[in-house]
Image: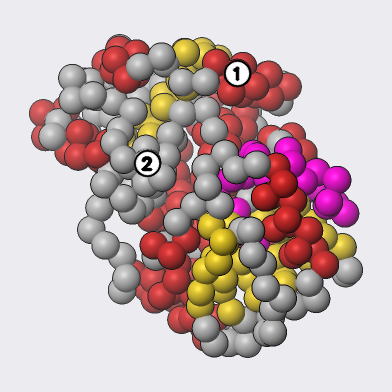
Amino acid sequence: MTQTYVSGEVMVPASVPTMYFVGVTTGQSSIRPVFEQWARILNRTDVQLVGVDLPLRADASAYRNVVSFMREDPLSLGALVTTHKVQLYRACMDLFDDVEPAAATLKEVSCLFKRDGRFVASAKDPLTSAYALDAFMPASHWGHSPGEVVSLGAGGSALALASHFAEVTDGQKGPRRLVVTNRSLERLEEFGHTYRALGGGPELELVHATGPEVNDAVVSDSPEGSLIINATGLGKDAPGSPLTWDAKFPKHGYAWDFNYRGDLVFLDQARAQQEERSLHIEDGWVYFLHGWTQVISEVLDVEIPPSGPLFDELAHAASAVRRPS
């Protein structure tokens, strides 16, 4: 079995059953050395992984080229989509036979798969972000903390986590308030429109972050016990952090970077205050594991529970290639 990556402009018919990874720099992803081990554990060594690299904010024609190819190519089984989730969905809605409810609500796609001759678009992030959050933050936290959720970034992953909180009907198991910042006012307004259409969840505040100093102020003003999330992609898809070094994290708070590779400056900023502010710091590794295993489950049509012996075996196999964050 081979693993490779290609430009989204040049898709080559698959010669063996193939799963794709649509991203920006897929050749650098930790999944590449892991996938072969996982395929062996899942008894699917016949499947290869091929990364598809597309630039940030690619043209609609590039997304349609990739999706049309996967739809028509007999040995192309499906794909995991990262970074491009919203743009790919917008460009390719008419190319899907079925759109699962979460994808239709969030207007994004993170998983493409074929089932019974139909090409299906799915959004797994509401589920996988909840699994990842539960792995480091007890649900009871919100019942005894004044903390809020602050998402620096209003992209698809941030909206997916917000949709999870919108489904939490017990006020003791979710935050009272969700603050979302973003550089693009248009994206921020779209976030608000979609979130409010969900019809529940914490109170929402949207902040137009015209510069990192705006994010600094939001984080510094957040209550004790708040969850601060880097959902911008800065630190992985582009260097840097949405904060400056002047930001003050909340005492007894949580700093969570959705990224697990890159320069991860956001995590360095949190570590500089970890002892003084009693912070719990988490990178995106567990999110990465759940994100991939849930999509692989659909694409390969195999059952992978979010916990238990099989998940633990897959996590252990992946841990050998994890780089310190």
The residue at the point 65 percent across, 22 percent down is: 190
Task: Say above or below: 162 vs 47.
Answer: above
Helix, strand or loop at label 2? It is: loop
Check disc 2 and report the residue beneath it: 238
Q: x, y (%) of residue 86?
A: 64, 39
Can residue 141 be seen in the rendering of this structure?
Answer: no
Question: Which residues are the magenta region?
Answer: 79-100
| 262 and 159: which is toward the camera | 262
Horizontal arrangement in the rendering, residue 106 relative to residue 231 (left or right): right
Q: Which one is earlier in the sequence, the residue at label 1 or at label 2?
A: 1
Quadrant location, the N terminus = bottom right
The image shows residue 287 at horizontal and vertical percentages of 45, 52
Check residue 40 for magenta coloring.
Answer: no
Badge 1: few (under 14), some or many (20 or more) residues near its Cα, within 10 Å? few
- Residue 312 in the image: above or below residue 45: above
Q: Residue at x 24, y 39 (%)?
A: 265
Residue drawn at 31 percent across, 40 percent down: 239
Residue closest to the far front: 10
SS of the residue at dot 1?
helix
Tell me the tag on residue 154. none
Q: Amino acid at mark 1?
A: Glu
Q: Quadrant of residue 214?
A: top left
Where is residue 184 drawn, in percent x and y? 52, 20
Amino acid type, label 2: Ala
Circle 1 residue: 186
Looking at the picture, how far across and down is residue 46, in whole percent?
63, 87
Tell me whether circle 1 and circle 2 mark residues in contact (CB < 8 Å).
Answer: no
Marks counted in the figure total 2
Which residue is nearer to you in this view: 158 or 155?
A: 155
How is this picture coloured? secondary structure
- Asked whether residue 285 appears in the rendered view, the answer is yes
Taking the image as shown, residue 302 lies to the left or right of residue 246, namely right
